[in-house]
Amino acid sequence: MSFRIVSVSNFDELMSAVEQRDGDEQLLIINTTAMTAEQFVQAVASAKMAAFDFDGTLTTGSQFGIMRELLMRPDLAAQDVEDARAYFSGADQSNFGHISFIFRTVKRLADSIVSYSAFEAAVKNAKPRDGACTLLQTFSTHDVESSVAIISYGLNDWIFAWLKHFIDYQLYRQFGIYALHLQWGRHCPRYLMSSIGYRTVVTDSNKGYVMAMHCAQYGNGIVRPHQVFCMGDSAQTDLALLTEAVVRSPDGKIVQAGPSVLIIPKEKAISRAEAAMREQHRTVLPLKRAFEAGVAAFYFGDSLDPFVQIRTGKIAV
C-alpha cells in the first residue's frame, strides 16, 4: 500500500488532495499554516513523549461497542445504542452532556452485573490498529519518567487491561492512563457507580489540560507541550488535545504548534452502525475547524505503520 505526504496551505487544498487520493493510498496531509512537512517529520522522529486518544486511534473499534455486545444485558445495550446515536448526532455537547453520557453507560454496565473476569476477557476483542503497538514501543525511553499518555473519554480499567494484554509489561508500566477510573473491589460489579472515580473523568474540553499536566509532571524539564507527538481520531472530541500547544501572534498567525495528527480511517474493521456514528465527527465542518485551529497533520489511512517508519528514520522529507 502506497504512502504519500502532501503539503497544503488552506482547507480547500486539503479537500482537493483528499479527492485526488488514489484508492487505498495512505495520505498524510501537512497543514503548513502550523508547520512544514520537514518540521513535522523531524518533530515526530525526535519526540520523547506522546499523547494518544484510545478508541479509534490505538484501536479500530470502540470499547463501549464491545461492552454493549459482550457485557451488557440486551435491553440495556439497546438503550445505550440509542443514547450513543443521540450523543454522536450532536445532542448536548457541553461538559455536562459528555459526563452524563458516560455515567449512563457505566450505570448500564453495572446494572448488567458484569464480573471483572468477563470485563477483562472482553478487552481482547479491542484489536489494535495496525502498527499501534509498535508505535507505542518507539516511545520506550529513559529520558522521561512516563513517555506515553493515553487520554480517553472511556474507562481507565479497560485501557489498562488492553495494555496488559497487548503490550509488554516493561513498557506499559511507564504509561500514564487518563480516563474514568472504576473501583471494582470485592463489591463489584453491583456498586460500580457508588465507587466510581468521579474526578478521573475525561472529556474533550480537558484533554489538552491533561496532556499539559502529564508533560509538566513527567517531562523531566526537557519536554514541553509543543514537543509532544499527539494523535486522535475525532475532530470534535480530540481537538483540545491536538491543539493544546498552538500559540498565535496578535494578528492570528500560528507561531508555535506541536506535531499533532488527526487520523481519518476508512474503518473497514468496525460495524456499519458504529462507523455511521463516528462519521458525525468526520464531516467537512469539523475537519475545517480542526485545520483552522492548527492541527498540524491529517492522516487518511487505517494503519499507523507510516508513523513507525517516521519514528525509525525510514521515512524522511
Image (cartoon, grey):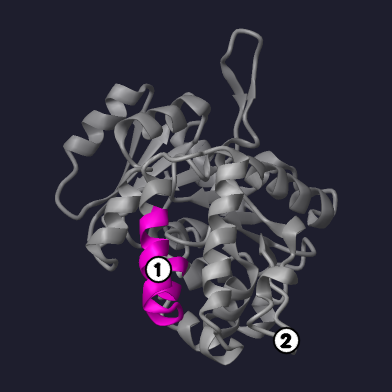
Image x and y of residue 96, in percent: 61, 43
Which of 159/232 is in front? 159
Where, by quadrant of the figure, is residue 297 drawn?
Answer: top left
Image x and y of residue 75, in percent: 38, 73
Relative to 222, is 20 above or below? Answer: above
Magenta region: which residues? 64-84
Q: Nearer the viewer, mark 2 or mark 1?
A: 2
Image x and y of residue 146, in percent: 74, 64
Quadrant showing the N terminus: bottom left
Q: Amino acid at mark 2?
A: His
User: In the image, is 37 to the left or to the right of 257?
Assistant: left
Residue 187 circle label: 2
Image x and y of residue 45, in percent: 55, 53
Which of 35/235 is in front? 235
Where, by quadrant of the figure, is residue 90 drawn?
Answer: top left
Q: Does the magenta segment cover residue 122?
A: no
Query: Residue drawn 51% across and 51% down?
Result: 231
